[in-house]
Amino acid sequence: MAEPILKVSNIETYYGPIMAIRGVSFDVPKGSIVTILGANGAGKTTVLKTVSGVMDPQKGSVVFDGREIQRMDPDKVMRLGISHVPEGREVFPFLSVRENLNMGAYTRRDADGVAQDLETVFGYFPVLKARAEQRAGSLSGGEQQMLAISRALMARPQVILLDEPSLGLSPKLVKDIFEIVVRINRERGVTILLVEQNANMALQTADYGYVLEVGRIVMADTCKRLMEKEDIKEFYLGIKEESARGKRRWKKRKTWR
Amino acid sequence: MQLTLNGLAVGCIYGLVALGFVLIYKATELVNFAQGDLLMLGAFVCYMAVVWWGLDYWVGFLIAVVAVGAFGALLDRVVLRQVIGQPQFAVVMLTIGLGAMFRTFASVTWGSEIYTLPTPFSGVWTVGGVTLSHQYLSIVFGTLLLCGVLYAFFNHTRIGVAMQATSQNQLAAYYMGIPVKLIFSLIWAISAGVAAAAGILLAPVTLIDINMGLAVALKAFAAAVLGGFGSIPGALMGGIVIGLIELYAGATLPEGFKDTAPYIVLLIMLIVRPQGLFGTMARKKV
Ligand SMILES: Nc1ncnc2c1ncn2[C@@H]1O[C@H](COP(=O)(O)OP(=O)(O)O)[C@@H](O)[C@H]1O
Ligand SMILES: [Mg+2]
């Protein structure tokens, strides 16, 4: 496996007295797509916020490209090459789509490169080109998600942190967006850390997966193997084995922990 | 006609100060009650440059706007940044206290008498039988010019758009690598600089003394509320409406109405249309 571009070790993150992340470690190899699966409230968003510097971990380290970045300000982390696509899109509602994209390129000085990347994202999401002069707040949820991903891409990052891009979108839209995420990874070599509740989509998209439960990593494997595991099938993919159903319903316990 | 011009001019001043309220409020969700005293400082610094140091009016103007603007940024950095996360009323009290400190500082430095700032605008124009005084015209044109510059800045420069972005969604601005803290300081600088400019433009009308900012700030606050607290065109329009009401009420209604009429209108407005003239119901996130 390639050298990890992002290495998170034993981070503990608190909301005041509440410990939301209880010693989480994971590696993101350069050029890969890694996913962290978890139910609502598991701590996925908190992990991403700790990586991007919006929250500071009490303990542990985040190493990006050989450099410790925990407790760094978010704008510094971003300048190093990590772009965060937050949960709930968080577009600038009263700026136009084009202005939103330009804000994504705020830290860049190479006007030619920015113009080129603008064309690239319009290629990925033609609907954004059609709506370039429209206020971002007037876009649909799916379009705002596309904008949020494109805006992150405009920084020409090495790593993109994607927080639940499927949230509130139709299955068809989710499929379209995940296809583009894979293309961004393959064509532009951008490493992607994806956190999702939608295990089905995430496992099909990613190379390697972690399962997060109440602030702890409880399972880690390649996505191919994760998809085969009974626990994942039952608790995250909602598939049940027909044969043993009656017994299973009562007896089955999660086998981890 | 003369009355309309005067009302318009005074309203422009309210509008400019209200604009400062709104800029700071939109970005930092904090109401700066020292805005009127920054206006007073602007007028005094210009007075000092022109009368004490014998500089040209325009040089004095520039020095005052830059100095008070820089002072605004400094205030943000060394005072307001320390109280982030404190309860709203504590911050409000702090800005009121700052205002009182500025007035004390002004009376110690420049004295507590009333001063006259000599300006190049002493003449009048007579157009078709009506006389328009240059003093009032200079206020209106100055405001138009300032608003034009600010409009261009906020819409056509990278940092200006970044200021809008930061006001709309602070967290996302961080994610874009926008230096949010620097942006806040710049917004303070602009608000303070605009207040200083308003003070200098207003100086020939009200004369300069340490309390000149108080009445203006109160009416400007009303103007900002009238305009929907959060809308920049609203703040300017609110200022002009209040300026006009004030002068017409002063000329046509019995003694005492000049100062209360704007608040009566504000009260009616808040009952009939609580979101203000230009207010939107959209709330900001984060
Ligand atoms: N602002 C907050 N204040 C206090 N607790 C929070 C806050 N945000 C999240 N939490 C708690 O932290 C835990 C992890 O939340 P989060 O990272 O948002 O989970 P996820 O993104 O997986 O749904 C949850 O138990 C949640 O209640
Ligand atoms: Mg979340």
Image (cartoon, coloured by chain):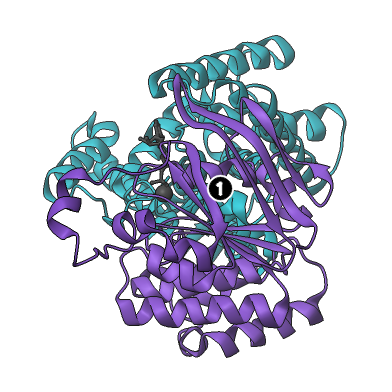
Q: Residue at x 64, y 30 (%)?
A: B76
Along the viewing direction, whichever of A86 and B59 lies nearer the viewer = A86
Along the viewing direction, whichever of B256 and B78 lies nearer the viewer = B78
Residue A7 percent location from the top left of the image: 71, 47
Residue B137 percent location from the top left of the image: 55, 57
Vertically, is B195 above or below A210?
above
Q: Is residue B20 visible?
A: no
What is the drawing colour of chain B? cyan
Q: Quadrant of the C terminus of chain A?
A: top left
Q: Amino acid at mark 1?
A: Leu
Residue B67 percent location from the top left of the image: 76, 35
Q: Which residue is mark 1?
A: A48
Which chain wears purple? A
Q: Quadrant of ligand 1?
A: top left
Q: Residue at x 37, y 80 (%)?
A: A173
Q: Quadrant of residue A103?
A: bottom right
Q: Is residue B51 left or right of residue B271?
A: right
